[in-house]
Structures are given as structure tokens and as C-alpha cells.
Amino acid sequence: MSKSALALRLEKRKKAIEAGSYSSEDAVSDNKITRTLSLASGKAVELRLYTFTGKSSIEDCTDVDASNIRNQDLLNDESLKDILSSIEVGQLYPAIGYMENGIVKVVDGSRRRKAAILRDCSFSVEVADCKISLKDAEEIVRISEQKRKLSYIEWGKYYQSKLDRNIYPSAKCLAEKEGVSTGYVSLCLNAAKLPEEIIDVFIDLSLVSSQKDTKVLVEIGNTLRSNELSPKSFIEQIQDELSNALSKSNTPEEHTEMVLAILLSSAKKIKNSKIDVAKEDKKLPKIEKLGGGVTFAIRSKDSAVINLRKVSEDKRNKIKEFIKELMN
């Protein structure tokens, strides 16, 4: 079977990353103040432009701030395809961060940071002259969402981290303070609980951003839990179909659609098999224990069975005679 354009592109990018695109020495440049950023809080922060050259320099000198809700584990060569090709030529918009203990904490621009690491090239950050507060950082993160939509899963992990840190006492309080519906928060939190095995089958999770598709994934996760089926076993059972989807799809959008269909179809088969078993169980006669090893079961409205297991021959004869007398 010939490989699709998408499969070939993934293969090519993987080889490029393994081989390394650049071989440059680390370098950090500190220029004069570039601009002043005015935040909604009224705070004005001065920004200086820093440039880190090479993967090791970026990883050693920068980190992603806790306020950035982008799930870093989901950033890969496919989910970053829209900026990987251009990041090597030049970074049009610098990231934004602040300095803490000699490390630049990136508030906005974690995708650009990861792309630069993957391409082993330069990464530019406008660094604030003071620590950016969580509230101010969230403002910048929300602005950055307009560049690339965040998934319900990423928002869910963000909301869960706030609950874990006791910033809000409950999901209901969180929804009120964040200005979103309780239903939205509930879906996000449930999406954040999805097993990694399910999430990892998508080459670009940001494409699973609709409420409908997210509900499908959450329902699949619930089906696996209710049937006590491990996500790993579930994925292994449909691995051939998933591989076939990669071979046939030509774009990440096509791949996402095909994978969702495969997951949903497989989950429905599990639910239907459970329903069939339940129906079979209902067909079985209800057995009533009468004591001494004697059981009585009604098979239909016209038939019943008396089982005399472990009953002595003498007692069996007495029972038989009693039935004869009763029926005469």
C-alpha cells in the first residue's frame, strides 16, 4: 500500500528532527528596551529582546510558565506544522516572558519555543523587567488563543490545576469567576481525564476542538471504564485501522475525522456486545433454591424445571409420588 502525502510528510519530518537541522553554538543577546506593554490591570512593563540560539540554549535558559495552559506534551512536529517551516527562516513575533532566577519564563509563545527546539534554531523572547502576575499572564494567554484555538482538553487541564491549587473551592465557583458555564467547565474537566493512549492517536489534537467531538471522546473514555477495558488494549485492537487511516488521509483534518470515526465505531461495538450479553442473561431462567440441593426454575409461562441434585433416591421417590398425588 502506497503511503499518503500526510504519512510521507510525517516520516520526512521525523527524520529531519532525528538528524538535526542546525549545528550552532549557544548564544544569548540582550538588547535595549524594545517596547512597553500595557496590561488591563494598568501595569506597564518594559520589555527587552532576548534571542537564544540552538536547542540546548533554549532548553537551558527558558521554561514555560505555569500560567501558560498549552499542554506541552501535545506539541510535536505535526501539531506545529503551521510554524515549523517558517521558524527557521525567522520568528516574526517574539514570545513574551519574564526572568526568574536566571531563567526566562515564557508566558505567551510556548508553541514558538517548542518549534525552535525541534528545529534547533533561534528563539526570541521579549522579557519583562518584573514578574508578570497570574492575572496579567492569563490576559496574555487569552489573547494568544486567538492565534490558535485551544482544545477542551487543554482548558480542562488548566481548570483542574486551579482546583488542585485551591484557587477555587469548586468547579461551580470556578465557572462563575471565569465567566463560563458550569456545563462548559464540566466538559473540559472530563476531557482532561481522557487517557493518554486515546489522546496520542491524534497527530494534531487542536483539530479536536468542537464540543461535539470532545463529547464523543469523553463518552468513549466512559465506555472503556464501565467495561473495565484498558485504553492500551482498546488501541491495540484497532491499531491496524489507525495505521490504515494514516495511509489514506492526506491532511491532518482528514486524519482527525477518520480517527474519530474509528474510535466511535469501536466503542459502539463494545457497548452493543455488553447489551447483547445483558439480553442473554435475561433469557436465562431465574433459579430458586428450595433447600437440600433442590432448585426450581421457570423457563417460560408454560414450563418449569425442578432439579433434584444431591437428593437421595428415597427423597426423589417421595417427591415424585407427591407430584403424582397433587396432579391427580
Image (cartoon, rainbow, N blue to C red):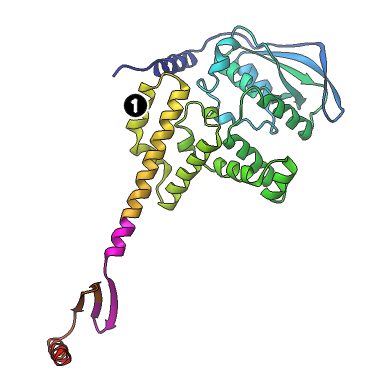
Estimate the x, y position of residue 223 in percent, counting from the top left. Answer: 43, 48
Residue 37: quadrant of the picture: top right
- Amino acid type of the residue that numbered disc 1 sits on in the rendered structure: Asn
Estimate the x, y position of residue 44 in percent, counting from the top left. Answer: 86, 23
Is residue 296 shown above or below 271?
Answer: below
Residue 279: quadrant of the picture: bottom left
Q: Is residue 72 left or right of residue 249?
A: right
Query: Which sits in the foreground, 117 or 272?
Result: 272
Q: Residue at x 61, y 18 (%)?
A: 56
Estimate the x, y position of residue 75 in percent, counting from the top left. Answer: 55, 26
Q: Residue furthest top?
A: 89
Is residue 38 shown above or below 92?
Answer: below
Residue 93: quadrant of the picture: top right
Quarter of the image that includes the C terminus: bottom left
Number of marks: 1
Residue bounds of the magenta highlight: 277-296
Is residue 53 shown above or below 106?
Answer: above
Q: Residue at x 54, y 43 (%)?
A: 193
Residue 319 seen in this snapshot: yes
- Residue at the spot of label 1: 244
Q: Is residue 278 left or right of residue 125?
A: left
Is residue 322 shown above or below 239?
Answer: below
Q: Is residue 327 left or right of residue 22?
A: left
Residue 195 seen in this snapshot: no
Quarter of the image that includes the N terminus: top left
130 drawn magenta: no
Q: Residue at x 25, y 75 (%)?
A: 297
Callout 1 secondary element: helix
Query: Which sits in the foreground, 209 or 308?
Result: 209
287 drawn magenta: yes
- Density class for disc 1 (Cα within 10 Å; few <14, some 14-19, many ≥20) is some
Estimate the x, y position of residue 229 in percent, counting from the top left. Answer: 40, 48
